């Protein structure tokens, strides 16, 4: 069974889901409007809604496999995910007030790292 790790951002009204090696056939039945990952992609971020078990909006982060969860990919995909959350809430990264964006990127990176190390906190 494909494991979908779910995290609650708490301060923003979005969920974060992280999958590793999840087949598209499983993902498409659980999330709204997701496309297959590009053939050579290591990772992908989708702003979507989980359909099962209940409808929740959030960010789906897909990694092709565990080897794809590198420091570079964690950093890169965390920035994409944080920008998606900011867009949803109508916020923008501000060079004069970088902390909200930086903290969100850090939280997302921590969640991915927990999945990588199999140490997800409850």
Image (cartoon, rainbow, N blue to C red):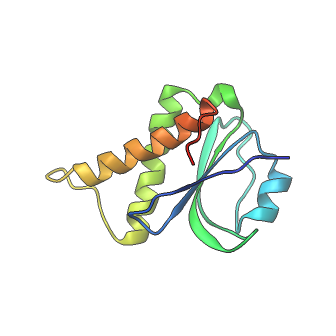
Frontmost residue, 111 versus 19: 111
Q: Where residue 29 appears, x then y in whole percent?
A: 82, 64
- What residue appears at the point 46 percent right and 69 percent down from the top-left corner? 13
| Placement of 95 over or under 114, stated as above or below | below
Along the viewing direction, whichever of 97 and 41 lies nearer the viewer = 97
Q: Quadrant of residue 16?
A: bottom right
| Residue sitting at the far left | 96
Horizontal side of residue 25 vs 20, given as left or right = right
Residue 16 falls left or right of residue 67: left
Classify residue 63 by image quadrant: top right
Extreme front residue here? Answer: 122
**Number of callouts in the render?**
0
Along the line of sight, the residue nearer the viewer: 39 or 102? 102
Q: Examine the rendered structure and indicate whether residue 37 appears above or below residue 49.
A: above
In percent of width and height, residue 8 lies at: 51, 59
Q: Is residue 59 above or below residue 23?
A: below
Q: Horizontally, is 61 left or right of 51 in the view?
A: left
- Residue 84 image position (x, y, % from top left): 46, 59
Query: Which residue is pictured at 77% across the width and 56% down the height?
Result: 27
Question: Residue at left 67%, top 74%?
Answer: 55
Q: Residue 62: percent from the left, percent from the top?
A: 65, 45
């Amino acid at each position: 069974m494909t494991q979908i790790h779910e995290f609650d951002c708490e301060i923003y009204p979005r969920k974060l889901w992280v999958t590793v090696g999840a087949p598209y056939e499983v993902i498409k039945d659980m999330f709204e409007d997701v496309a297959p990952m590009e053939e050579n992609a290591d990772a992908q971020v989708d702003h979507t809604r989980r359909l099962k078990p209940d409808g929740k909006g959030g960010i789906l982060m897909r990694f092709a496999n565990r080897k794809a969860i590198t420091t570079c990919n964690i950093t890169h995909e965390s920035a994409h995910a944080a920008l998606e959350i900011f867009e949803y809430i109508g916020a923008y990264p501000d060079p004069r007030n970088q902390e909200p964006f930086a903290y969100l990127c850090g939280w997302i990176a921590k969640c991915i790292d927990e999945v990588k190390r199999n140490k997800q906190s409850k």
